[in-house]
Image (spheres, grey):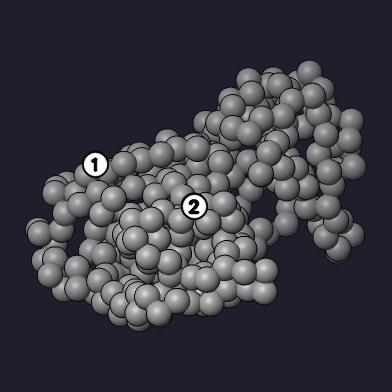
Amino acid sequence: MKENRLLEMRIFKAVVDAGGFTAAAHLLGVSQPFVSQTMTSLERRLGVQLIHRSTRGHRLTGEGEQFLSACGRILNEIELAEAQVSSARSKVSGELRISAPLAFGLDQIVPLLPEAMADQPNVVFHLALSDSIANLIEDNVDVAIRMGRLTDSSLKSRKLCDLQRLVVAAPSYLEAHGLPQTPADLRRHNCLMWEGPRDHLNRWSFRIDGTVETLLASGNFRSSNGLTLFELCTAGVGIMRLAEHLALPAIREGKLVPLLSDHQVHDDTAISAVFLPERELLPRIRNFVDYLVEAFRQPPWSE
């Protein structure tokens, strides 16, 4: 289909640049079968073989060399051309697909959408909220909000703000189970834990006697959904290490109590907007990312 042609070109060029399907998949952060299926579909649509495949490797056919040259030129020029033609904000149009973690999306991104949509009235906005990490290519995402350290070097990113997590519990939980005085006391408490791709968040760091030590949280409940963990924490089920955008308002409202503040470690992580490099110049993407950067310059939860 026509809307897949830019994706096919990007994958074809990556296969050539990386020297194979598996290496291209690693470069783009997608699966090897996805690369293979895309290449097969591209060659079938064009009616020519672009790459000779053998046990000794891959090499371009004559048609492949010709197509590669065209792909390089098109990938370099197409986004700039769109940006120049649609330079006026009032002319910005198209679809903007956004992905964000569930709790952060509901709490922070959704309230920003009315102004963003009014600013780009001809853009159709799509918002997917999930604690699974979206793949920008396979999931057809223009802008993804990521919390924590970025690992995909093939993407471009802009930092929105620092990310800090606090250890908290509801007053009802502390009344029933007591207040942990040291990080070691958490071993005798019920900690609410992540499962799935975010289970690394179950390792809680504390400053103890001048050094940073990591404690593996344990408890009787796990979830891949951050909003579920937050709701159970405020309900008094257990202790949680919670992002500030939810923790600070809940602390101010008396729903949660900060714990082990003397042992708090500053998180060297951030909340970022990520996008594919060749789409940075698209006005609808650039405008939305600029809007997010400005909106989180002073994070709303820090007021």
Q: Which label's residue is closer to the chain start, 1 or 2?
A: 2
Q: Is residue 96 above or below residue 81?
A: above
Q: Is residue 15 above or below residue 297?
A: below
What amino acid type should be assigned to the residue bearing mark 1?
Answer: Pro
Query: Dot 2, crowdedness within 10 Å: few (<14), some or many (≥20)?
Result: few
What amino acid type should be assigned to the residue bearing mark 2?
Answer: Gln
Left or right, 31 with respect to 263, comes to left
172 vs 152, nearest the viewer: 152
Q: Residue at x 74, y 25 (%)?
A: 221
Circle 1 or circle 2, nearest the eye: 2
Q: Is residue 135 above or below residue 219?
A: below
178 vs 293, nearest the viewer: 293
Residue 114, which numbered label?
1
Q: Is residue 162 visible?
A: no
Q: Position of residue 241 (x, y in %)?
A: 68, 41
Query: Which quadrant of the view contains residue 278?
Result: bottom left
173 vs 135, nearest the viewer: 135
CA gap between label 1 and label 2 equals 39 Å
Query: Dot 1, crowdedness within 10 Å: few (<14), some or many (≥20)?
Result: few
Residue 37, which numbered label?
2
Left or right, 39 with respect to 96, comes to right
Q: Residue at x 34, y 60 (%)?
A: 47
Q: Residue at x 55, y 47 (%)?
A: 133
